[in-house]
Structure formats: C-alpha cells, structure tokens
Image (cartoon, helix red, strand yellow):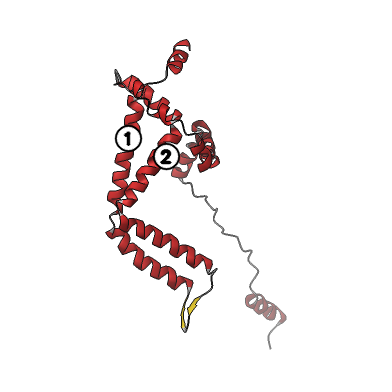
C-alpha cells in the first residue's frame, strides 16, 4: 500500500507539464534580381518610337493605296521619257535631289516598269513560271474542297495528303528553276533602270523655280 503522498508524486511524474511551443518560422527573404532592376530603368515605349518615325502612317498609306489607283496616276510617256530634260548631274547632291523628286513624282511609272521587268523575268524562266502557276492552282483547288477529302473513283486523299504531295512536287522543281538568280536579276535590272532614269532626268523648270523661291 502506498501513501497518498507517494501516489501524488507518481501522478506528477507520469503527466509531463505542457511546454509552450515556439514558432521557429524563419523570416522569408525576397529575392532581388539586379538585372531586372537595371532593365526596368531602360524601358523604352514602343509607341514612342513608332510615332516618332511615323511607321504606322506609312503602313496605312501603303495598304490604302490600291493597284488601280496607283496605275491611274501614271504620268504621260512624253513626260516620263522627255529626252530634252535628260542630262548628267553636276554632283552627287544634284543627283540625290533628282532621285528624290523623280521617285516621288513618277512612282506609278516606276511601278509599271518593275511589273514589266518581272513579267520579262518570268518569261525567261519558264520553269519558274510553271512552278508558280502550279502552286497557286494547287492551293486554289485544295481550298475549293473546303476541308473535304478528294475522291476519284475508289481513290481517296485528305487535304493534308494533297498539301504534302504539292510540296513534294513544288519544292524540288522550285529549286531547280533557279529562283535566286531570277530575283537577283530583277533587283539589279530594276535598280539600274529606275535609279538611272531618276538620276539623269532633270527636274521641271516649275519645280526648280519653286525651290529657289523657298
């Protein structure tokens, strides 16, 4: 038999006192990226650059000008090929002034010259012309299917198979037709013809007097 004092002592040893728990949460530290802080100082608004160079206005002007209205502004052949005004520029400044004026004044005529040179380039590269017609006709025909399969008798082909077949045929033929030489010839011939005409054709007398008055 144990005494009441011994029982009370055993009770205190079996039941441990509640120990208050401390929250050992470590303070979170925010990561600081010095590169992001530096780049944020050099944040240049794109709208300011486009408005400064008026890029949006230039693109809108190109889209708004149709082919019919451009070729409607063609200047007469007698004015475009006025041999009386053809002369060698005295210096580079005069040539630059003539080029700037004539490119703006005869823009529709130069577009017609570029179109004629493009047609001539295609006629001298018949294989390239065939590939272009083949690709345009093939894509038009596949588009007319509106996603449906092409069925000829018991043979059936999906649109993806038709596009793949078109690419397999057109890519080797396109590379064989020397498209890069045709493009380089077109750029060179157009540049020499257009820039040469603009540099050697003198400004009209009215334009010269107006510049002197200003």
Classify residue 184 by image quadrant.
top left
Q: Is residue 159 above or below residue 174?
A: below
Camera-nearest residue between 87 and 23:
87
Residue 112 tag number: 2
Q: Quick check: 63 left or right of 174?
A: right
How crowded is the residue under tag 2: few (<14 C-alpha within 10 Å), some, or many (20+)?
A: some
Identify the disc placed on residue 154: none
Where residue 99 sits: x, y (%)? 37, 27
Disc 2 on helix, strand or loop? helix
Relative vertical location of residue 114 with respect to residue 195 in this rendering, above or below: below
Query: According to the image, label 1 marks what residue?
Result: 193
Give the camera-side residue of 9 and 42.
42
In the orientation shown, which residue stands out farthest toward the bottom?
Answer: 1
Residue 133 falls in image quadrant: bottom left
Please report the residue visible at 51 percent of the width from the left and 31 percent of the height from the top: 52
Q: Residue at x 63, y 73 (%)?
A: 16
């Amino acid at each position: 038999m144990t005494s009441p004092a011994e029982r009370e002592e055993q009770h205190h040893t079996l039941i441990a006192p509640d120990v208050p728990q401390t929250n050992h949460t470590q303070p979170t530290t925010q990561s600081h990226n010095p590169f992001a802080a530096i780049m944020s100082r050099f944040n240049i608004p794109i709208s300011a650059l486009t408005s400064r160079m008026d890029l949006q206005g230039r693109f809108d002007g190109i889209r708004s000008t149709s082919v019919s209205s451009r070729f409607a502004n063609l200047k007469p052949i007698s004015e475009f090929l006025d041999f009386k005004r053809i002369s060698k520029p005295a210096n580079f400044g005069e040539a630059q002034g003539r080029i700037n004026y004539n490119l703006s004044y005869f823009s529709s005529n130069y577009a017609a010259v570029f179109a004629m040179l493009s047609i001539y380039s295609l006629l001298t590269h018949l294989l390239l012309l065939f590939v272009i017609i083949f690709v345009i006709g093939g894509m038009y025909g596949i588009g007319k299917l509106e996603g449906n399969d092409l069925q000829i008798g018991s043979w059936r082909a999906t649109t993806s198979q038709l596009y793949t077949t078109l690419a397999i045929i057109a890519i080797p033929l396109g590379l064989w037709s020397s498209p890069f030489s045709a493009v380089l010839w077109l750029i060179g011939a157009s540049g020499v013809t257009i820039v040469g005409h603009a540099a050697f054709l003198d400004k009209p007398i009215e334009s010269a007097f107006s510049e002197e008055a200003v």
